[in-house]
Every structure is written in structure tokens, then in C-alpha cells.
Amino acid sequence: MCLALPAQVQELLPDDMAMVMLGGVTKEVSVALVEDVAPGDYVIVHVGFALSKLDPEEAEKTLALFAEVAAAQ
Amino acid sequence: MSGFPAEGRLEITVTVADGHFSAVRVDSSRTLALPSLFRGRAAAEVPALCGRLYAVCRMAQGLAAAQAVERAAGLAVAAGQQAARRLLLRAETVLDQGGRALLEWPLLLGQGADAAACKALRGALADLPRLLYPDNDWLRPGGGRLAPDLAVLRDRLRRARAVVETAVLAGQGVGARLAAHLRAEDMEGFGACFLPALPSWSDLDVAQGLAWHDPAFIAAPTWRGLAHRTGALARLERHPALAGAGSGLLGLLRARLTELALALDDLDALAARRLEADPAAAFTGGDGVGIAVVETARGRLAHRLEMADGLVRHYAILAPTEWTFHPEGALVKGLLGAPAGPDPMARAGLLAALLDPCVPYRVTETPAMSGA
């Protein structure tokens, strides 16, 4: 059930890798599947790969929904 | 941000005694409470929320939610919309299963992920919803404005087929390489077990046979009291391509490859049909409860909605990973009693990979209790 958690790119690394911030935790993921990723962009990550970019407004809306889930738990 | 829902993972703990797997435990940290977010919201919003909140299965989740809303409201959806939805579900199967084959299977062979091919596949299929529904209203209950550019659609399907056939299904593709590896390691039958395939469900079955309000059931579902198999092998167990392949690693691999080939053919057939705007959905009268069952890349996905005055009173989602990684499901039954070999964690990981959970997993080994 693979949640579409938006992760914000913090830093681009060599070999199509990037450091992203996901739910307050930084992790290294591959950005080989998406074009023109830059620090500050939001991406959807699944099993170590960024699958797609997300515009900031969409990302904020999605993050707000996940925050609601967290608050309810 | 503590408590923010993480992607979740499966922790698979194995114990080996006398050279065989003697105990297997699966702990899931997957967030299953997401549907609670829908309570009190307008039911008509739920499909779009599902399309936003889920990642690789977003088309299946969104379309299952749309169908649940339509059934609860008594909306009959036109044939053209149904064909377009079927096309999206099969495209997502190709995208997901092709993607796993390209990114994960090479790692099982000690090789690098084929990111270039996966990127090409995503470029062909990931935005199909918008291609079919230019207003991006594909998750509107009753159906959005269906107006595909058929020439572009068919070109996308040709591109997807070229990637999958070349990089996965061909004689030198990753599927054949993985099959050769299983044969060389004498692992073709590893992980085999008897587990009945989930049968087709009638409306009455899903209304009465599943404990939709019980979180423990949603986390570890059974059918008529028993764990069941879902996914490609369950769907294709009688397909000629699987004759003699068994239910172990080779059977699982061959089922996934066959599913990919069949899904590509389905896409071509669906793209040849009339995918046009249809008359608006018709009201047939609903009782406020809607259930949807769809076959996704990983198996059967079911949604159930209860609504009153257009608002969600209860929502439940039953996902395939909970069947497959059930305490008595395909992973656990496949490992228990099987030879552990020189690297038990790698063996268990191989079975987990081919059973294909929708979240990351980790295998660890814990020592057997001595003196037992």
C-alpha cells in the first residue's frame, strides 16, 4: 500500500543519487528515473527510487493530509 | 514531526535449525490506518485522495475508490469509461511489475538496476491517466471527460512493449537471466507450498465474508478462515505457461513474466476499443454501501465505503500485501521447512522479492533456541 510521501531534495550527489528529507528523516535515494531534479524539489520515493516530481503546492497538500493521519494515530 | 507516517517496511525474521527454516516471523510497520482519514469527508473526494496518497498503486487505489463510491451512490458507469479504467489498471500492472523487474531483479543477480529502461517505461505509461482524461478528472465518480489522443496512446503502448520485451521478456532479458540463475543454483522449487488461490468473489461474498470493521482482519486477512494466495501466480496457476513450474521461485517468476506479456496484449486490445466520451453515468439507486474489488499488479485489492448524506461513515481497504505476507501466507509457508542453504537470509530475501511486497523489506536471522 506504498504511500506517496513527498520527500524534499536536500542535495544532489554523484551517480544520479540525492539526499532527500522524508518525514523528518534524511535518506539517500536514486533520482535516475526523473528529469532535472534540483535541491528544493519534491519527489515521490518508492523503495529507494524517486519516481516522480511533485509541484510544491501539491506536495504541501499531500504533506498536510499525512500530518492529519499522524495526528489521528 | 515524530509520528509522521513512514513508508513502512516488513521485517522478516527467520530461524534455522538442522539446515532448514524452522521459524519465520513477519512484522509489518505499514500504515494501514490511512482510510480513517476519509471519515467525515465527502465520499466523492475519496478517489482523488487515494490517487494522491498512494504511490505505485495509485491508479488501482483511485479507481477502486471511484467504483466503491459509484456503487454506494448507485451510479452505473458507461462501457467506454470501464474500458478506459481497465486500460489504466493493466498499464499500472506493466509499469509496476516491469519496474520491479528492471530495478530489483538485477540486484538479485548481483548486477546494477536497469534505471534507463525503467525510466523509458515510466515515460511511456506513468501519465496515461492524463492522456486518457485531458482534464485530469479520471477519478471523478461516474467517470471524467474521456478524450484520448489514440495515436499518442498507441505510440505509448508500443514504447512500453518495446522496453518490456527487450529488457525483461527477451531471451537475454532479466527474466531469462533470473530463471537461469535459479536453475544453476537448484532453486527453482524453493519456497513452494500449498496455498489455495483466492477464488472469485461474488458481491455477497465481499459483503459478508470479510471483516471490514476489524483492524486485525485488515492486517492479516483470511478467506473462510484460511490464508490464501493472491497475485500473478494465483491468477495464472492454470495457465499453460506455468505448467510444471510449481509454486516456488520458478513458478512465481514465470507467473510474473506471463502476467507482463498478457497485460501488454490486454493494453493493445483495449486501445483498439471505443475509448470515447459516453453519456453520463446513470443512477440506479444505491444503499450507501459500496464495495469494489480490482486485480492489481500484486493481487486483489478491495475497498469498502459506508456513507450517509454523501459523507464517509466508514472506509476500509484490504490490500494484497496483507494476504501474501500473512502469518500463514505464501512467504511463511514457503519458507518453513525449506532448506536454508549456506545463506539463509539471501534465500528468504529471494522468495520475498518474487512475492513482491509493496514496501521495502529486511530479512534478519535469529538463532534457534538451544536445548529445545
Image: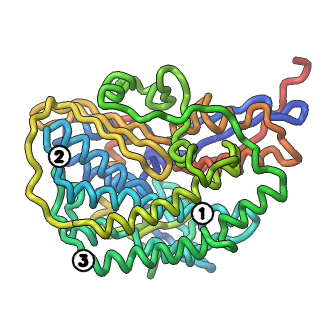
| Amino acid on which the number 1 mark rests in the picture | Ala
Quick check: B223 above or below B124?
A: above
Where residue B61 sits: x, y (%)? 35, 49
- Pointer 2: what residue? B44
- Pointer 3: what residue? B149
Instruction: Pick whichever of labels 3 and 2 is earlier in the sequence.
Output: 2
Chain identifier of the residue bearing label 1 in the image: B
Chain identifier of the residue bearing label 2 in the image: B
Q: Residue B302 or A14: which is nearer the viewer?
A: B302
- Pointer 1: what residue? B101
Q: CA distance from mark 1 to mark 2?
A: 35 Å
Q: Residues within 10 Å of mark 3 (few under 14, many from 20)?
A: few
Q: Assign the C terminus of chain A to one quadrant of the image.
A: top left
Residue under the image location 76 percent in, 45 percent down: B189
Q: Residue B31 or B333: which is nearer the viewer?
A: B333
| Amino acid on which the number 2 mark rests in the picture | Ala
